[in-house]
Image (cartoon, grey):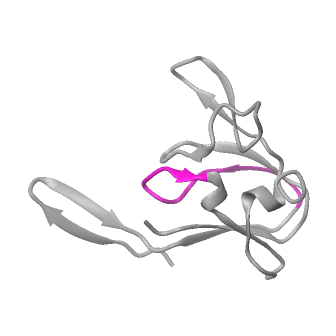
């Protein structure tokens, strides 16, 4: 369930969100993005498979989920890579950006932390 709480300060709105989990039940390609309204370092996300223990992205990359994830940069007019490898162009899930992600194992889920 998604809940948010708005705090008013001057003319700005700050939205606080709880940690949020996304599930990927089958092997294959997914179009995904961070459900949080701020950037998140990819290794701060916690991944589980079939309800097991949580692990950071660095422990499951290229085992459960492909590194890199791929996104399109309108500013550069080309595809870019996101992940933790040296060839990757970015290491953060950026707010409001979509990524193509390949999942190698069924029953994978990711939790994006609260601020």
- Where is residue 82, by image quadrant? top right
| Relative height, residue 106 to residue 10 (above, below) | below
The residue drawn where x is 58% and y is 26% is: 73
The residue drawn where x is 79% and y is 82% is: 51
| Residue situated in front as seen by the camera: 52 or 86 | 86
The spot of residue 112 in percent (x, y) is 58, 65
Residue 30: say if magenta.
yes
| Residue situated in front as seen by the camera: 28 or 61 | 61
| Relative height, residue 38 to residue 74 (above, below) | below
The spot of residue 63 in percent (x, y) is 90, 57
The spot of residue 96 in percent (x, y) is 49, 45
Q: How many marks?
A: 0
* The residue stretch that appears in magenta: 27-41
Quadrant where the C terminus is found in the figure? bottom left
The residue drawn where x is 21% and y is 68% is: 7
| Relative height, residue 40 to residue 106 (above, below) | above
- Where is residue 79, by image quadrant? top right
The spot of residue 66 in percent (x, y) is 83, 48
- Where is residue 13, by image quadrant? bottom left
Q: Residue furthest left?
A: 10
Residue 74: say if magenta.
no
The residue drawn where x is 44% and y is 53% is: 38
Q: Residue furthest top?
A: 77
Left or right, residue 35 beside residue 63: left
Left or right, residue 77 beside residue 88: left
Q: Residue furthest front?
A: 86
């Amino acid at each position: 369930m998604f809940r948010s709480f708005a705090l008013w300060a001057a003319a700005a709105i700050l939205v606080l969100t709880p940690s949020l989990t996304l599930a990927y039940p089958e092997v294959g390609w997914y179009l995904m993005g961070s459900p949080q309204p701020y950037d998140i370092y990819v290794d701060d996300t916690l991944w589980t498979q079939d309800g097991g223990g949580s692990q950071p992205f660095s422990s499951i990359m290229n085992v459960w989920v492909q590194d890199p994830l791929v996104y399109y940069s309108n500013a550069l007019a080309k595809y870019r890579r996101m992940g933790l490898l040296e060839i990757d162009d970015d290491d953060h899930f950026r707010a409001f950006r979509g990524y193509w992600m390949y999942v190698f194992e069924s029953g994978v889920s990711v939790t994006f932390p609260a601020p």
